[in-house]
Image (cartoon, rainbow, N blue to C red):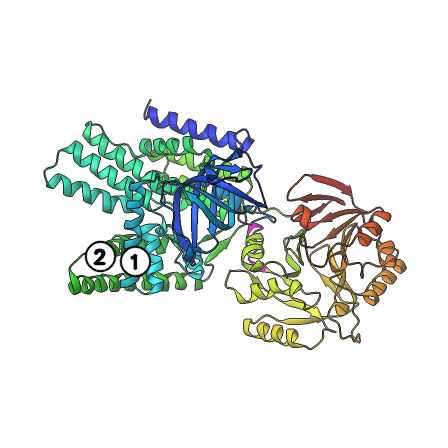
Amino acid sequence: MRRPLCVVCVAFVAVIFVCLRLGSLSLDEDVVDGGEAVYIGEVCQKECKNGKLMIYLKDVKIQSGVSGQNVFETNSVRKISGIICYVKNPLFEREPKLGAVIAVRGVAACFDVPRNHGEFDARLYYKTLGYDLALYSAEVLAESGVYSRYGEFLYGIKRRLEGALEMALDEEDAGIMKAILLGNKSGMAAEAKELYRRSGIYHIFAISGLHITIIGMSLYRFLRKARLPVGVAIGLSVFVMFSYGRMTGMSASAVRAVIMFAVKLLAGFFHRSYDMLTALALAAVLILMEQPLYILHTGFLLSFSAIVGICFFSNTVLVHLPIFLCVYYEFPIYSYLINLVIIPVMPVLMCSGIFCMFCAILPIGRVGMLLAYFFGGVCHIILKAFELLSVFSLKLPFAQWVTGRPDGWRVVCYCAVLIFIATAGKRLVASVKAPLVIAAVVLLASNTAGALRISFLDVGQGDCIYIETSDRRHYLIDAGSSSENGIAQYTLEPFLKYEGVSSLDAVFVTHLDSDHTSGVIGLLEESGGIEIERLVIAGAAIRDEAYYELLELCRTEGVPLMAAKAGDMYALGNETRLEVLHPSADYETQSRNAYSLIMRLEYQDFSALFTGDAEADGEQRAAEYLAQSGKGVDIYKVTHHGSRYSNTQALLEAASPKLSVISCAEDNSYGHPHAEVIEALNDIGSKILITKDTGEITVMVKDSKAAVSVMNSGVFQENGR
């Protein structure tokens, strides 16, 4: 058998993956959330981020109470893996030493779980890294006298090197170089991170094989030229690389690179041939034995798949494609070409950055600083070229291929084709390989339609409704929140890209309150790749400041702003119609809520009513229409987040919905939804779902049957009317 160790390691990795997908290795999620407590743990990492001191604790005990002078003697309630502490007054707190056991007090909170499809799973991410909770307003109560001198030594070196970059470079360049060389991304601007990610070169910030090749192999060759014994040179080189990895945070890619570096040197020492795939598989096993959840971690997948791609396909694009689509739901088309330019230049950038750091801290006076400024200038030129190249690539036609998240079976089929091509090797001619690859890519990126989909997104205190027709046209009704910041960037864009949407055929804004428009404005202002073909608002909208700001923004972005009135009918697809019931063309009011668009959607035998924040006269108009036409609705979007001053009895009886959906935030200051509304909905026999309890609510309609699913529980089905 060729590569027996590699085969065994790959089998182990496959078992871990299957067990995780089946849930048999699921880890404890029952952790404390909220309230003050005392936590005792070992300091394993610390950093200053945006002026805040963050302390990372491992092997944490949660204390039931503190009595007497020694907090370390209190009884623990339970143990958790780790916590991240955000210190309350970092300027007045002495930094605890690495390796010391400390007691901290603060308010604990669980990391966020996705409330809508496409959102970042912070709880899984931090659980993979070994942290269960965040501790806010943390106060250090006590610290043991024992600490890690080795850890503190590395931390001191890192701080000095960061300071050297800050002296020799401007703030923007220093933040990027600290990320590239020292693994500290906290100084990078959010815009820079997004630019590099969307252009497909974010991998340059991972401490990986390139760093080890430049630093580790250079050190090893230097030690051998200094006539040190081979064993000593290997030991020192591996130790220095391990220390470098620990200093930079020991990411999955750094651990992988250090292990493969050590295996390569040891293979030469024992006069054995070095097999990259075996070393890679061994590194995967060692990492997963420590934390199985790493197999779902993006950094782990990208780092390991890059080596696989280089070994079998001489590039990483084919192997990275399914990972990008499963994580980011889009792929930068020109990333391969950009990387052809950037990767050869990276050694120059890294060496210039290293020389810049050490010239700035070495005791050679002005000469050292002049050299640091020189190498810093080289870094600036290269980084500027990277930025211009990234910006240029994103302005090219078809820069981002938004496909949505592929189904699991599509990923399996795609991987099966790649495995077949890799194992066939030279026996498979190019005329056969190319069609196989093209077919696999098309299958991976395909989307199926054939059903109407309505998703009520959980945006906190606000409204956002997504509609996809059976022929894959895409619409929004409202998108805003008064309780969540940045919903366009953190909720709408990820959700839409998850669904494979790069362009919205229309956005209907019921009225211009911020809890219905902030996300729409964010989509118009941000360059996240989501285009809006047209914006529709009520023709009776008050010409106030919000109206003119939206009008000017639409003009700037080249988006038509259209007026809607009662009686207008919009064809959303082959079988989907959206009729405006309110307000009429001559409707006058001084209240934004009053002119809210009320619209009825109809598809086959299914119907839904969307009401915005309409007031009594608008609801009366809708009730009269429904009563006269004898048409009820299957889904009712409850007016004004469930306010007692809306949702009149006449409207509820005329609509007679099977399901009522309420969009509101948990513990909102308005008390939504009010008990009176819940009682009235129960009285008419309507099922009720509330986004604050369920997360995103999705209705799929096909063949006159509706299936309703929510983010945090199961699915129930209802026959359509």
Image vertical order of residue 661 relative to residue 8, above or below: below
* 3D distance between C-alphas at marks 2 and 1: 9 Å
Q: Secondary structure at mark 1?
A: helix
Kindly identify the residue that appears in the image at 35 percent across and 31 percent down: 282
- Whether pointer 2 and pointer 1 mark residues with C-beta atoms closer than 8 Å, the reply is yes
Foreground of the two, 401 or 369: 369
- Locate residue 305, reporting x and y percent: 39, 40
Residue type for callout 2: Ile
Asked if residue 299 lies left or right of residue 539, the reply is left
Asked whether 643 falls inside the magenta stretch, the response is no
> Quadrant location of residue 242?
top left
Dividing the image into 4 quarters, which one contains the N terminus? top left
Residue 375 visible in image: yes
Q: Residue furthest front?
A: 68
Is residue 130 in view from this perspective? no
Report x, y in % for residue 625: 86, 62
Indicate which disc residue 316 carries: none
Q: Toward the viewer: 268 or 545? A: 545
Q: Considering only order in the chain, which callout, 1 or 2, is on the residue closer to the N terminus?
A: 1
Q: Is residue 500 magenta?
A: yes
Residue 361's disc number? 2
Horizontal and vertical percent for residue 425? 35, 34
Quadrant of residue 556 within the rendered picture:
bottom right
Q: Secondary structure at mark 2?
A: helix
Q: Magenta part of the protein: which range? A: 498-503
Q: Would you call the spot at circle 2 few (<14 residues within 10 Å), some (14-19), or many (20 or more)?
A: some
Across and down, in percent, residue 548 comes to: 63, 76
Please name the amino acid that badge 1 sits on: Gly
Query: Label 1: which residue?
Result: 163
Residue at the image point whose x is 39% and y is 58% from the top: 187
Return the residue nearer the eye: 459 or 92. 92
